[in-house]
Amino acid sequence: MVAVTTGMYLMPDYNSSVGSTSEPIFAPQWRSLIDAKASPKFDTELVEFLRQCIAVPSISGQERPLVELAARQASQWGLHVDVFESDESRLVKHPVISQRHIPLKGRPTAVILLRGDYAGPTVMFNAHSDVVSPGDEKQWQHAPWSGAADGGHLYGRGACDAKGPMVAALGAILKIKENAGTRFRGTVGLEIIPGEEDCVDLGTLTSVDRGYRADAAIILEPTEGLPRCASRSGLRFEIGVLGRAVHGTVKWLGSDAIGGLRRLLSALDEMEVEFGRQDADDRYASYPVLRPITVDRIDGGEWQGMICDRASCSGYFELCPEDDLDMWQDRFMTELRSRFDAVRDAGQEVEIKFVERYQGFSTHIESSICRAAEMVIKYSPAAERWKKWRGFNSGCEGGLRFKLHRTKTLVWGPGSLAQAHRADEYVPIREVLDCSNWMAAAVMAYLNDDLAG
């Protein structure tokens, strides 16, 4: 181990599963950050920068202005910045490219780095730059691109998913630079990638193809300020019901695809309940649905006065981290066909295809990155909310590096999934700043100490 003069802390006999036998001795600058008592000079700038980020409507496919804004700001703060676009022809051998996605042309990636003076591992933060559509803006009390501050929150599309977490991570890098300079082991980076809302893993692949590697990764998503050690795998499906159109006044002579779709949706509800009874995962025990099946789009019918000859739905089937995607895909298709065949009208058929799949991850809680994060949280004001390690209740960008390089990975960030993708999305300002403090301390704990794992 390289000796680093700034020293993080001593850590005698720490055991992640049962707690420490004596409190770690934190250096004063990290102790004040963990206690959330410090007011670093960057905090006001971070809040203003987050407001500016929210004001950029970076809907999937339109990420460039946000990426360029972040790159300019990071450069002004003295960090190394690499902004690049990826040529899809270079990536064709990777399965993710064959999935449905918006083309990468015009959608840059930015990698922001702070390198230490001593050889060591790399920690890479990962944030997606794209957001979902705000929908009907009349449903918003605060305009979706306003970045309005109200009641200690910043409002707007992407506030918690994932611009707040992105800014928290950039703040963590700045606080490492402020408190340690470059006198630490290894490298801390932030990759800002396109397309997570459009196609999971696509954006991270652009950074991997550029040559960026990580020994540990922190995926920036809303986790209520507490680190998570796993994320879901998932399958995106498109299902069509075929019928036979006739005039509505003699509908008994045809076969109504909309009626068939209604029965199919009921079958999906039954499958969700059935799939939740099997192979329980303790990391997801606190969530009411173990393997969610969510329909997010329905289409059917073209002309009035006739029954529909084709109706369709699409959505996603989210799984536990170690679930076998091939097995669950086959089971989904078999179960749905069997249930639909039992209730369909004569002449109706069902078509099922999968247009996207993503692998989750699971990092052992005794790994060094988990131990560092848990230790910081246990000595922070968030300690009273910390019960045990849990999984992130969604898919995210953590699976690609974990699968390719066995990168030890966490999901961590301010805000809650309960606020994501809804009108008046918000992120608590204090949580953004606290997360930046805790992430900085945890990263330094990981880089500067030989923790087991």
Image (cartoon, rainbow, N blue to C red):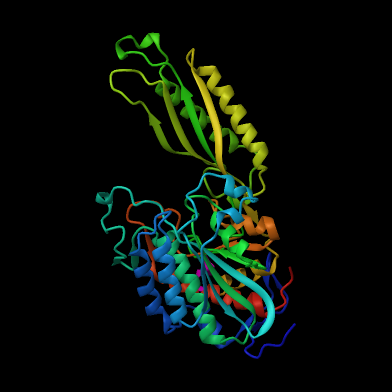
Q: Residue at x 55, y 82 (%)?
A: 30
The reply to whether residue 245 is in sight is yes
Q: Is residue 78 above or below residue 19?
A: below
Q: Residue at x 44, y 83 (%)?
A: 40
Horizontal side, residue 287 vs residue 310: left or right = right
Residue 397 pos. (x, y %): 56, 57
Q: Quadrant of residue 210?
A: bottom right
Q: Does 440 sit above or below residue 294?
A: below
Overall secondary structure of the magenta section: helix
Is 381 a magenta residue?
A: yes
Where's residue 155, x and y in %?
33, 62
Q: Is residue 235 visible?
A: no
Q: Position of residue 150 (x, y in %)?
A: 29, 66
Q: Which quarter of the rendering shows the N terminus?
A: bottom right
* Residue 83: % across, % down: 50, 69
Within the magenta stretch, is there residue 236?
A: no
- Rendered position, 62 above or below 34: above
Q: What span is colored magenta in the figure?
A: 380-384
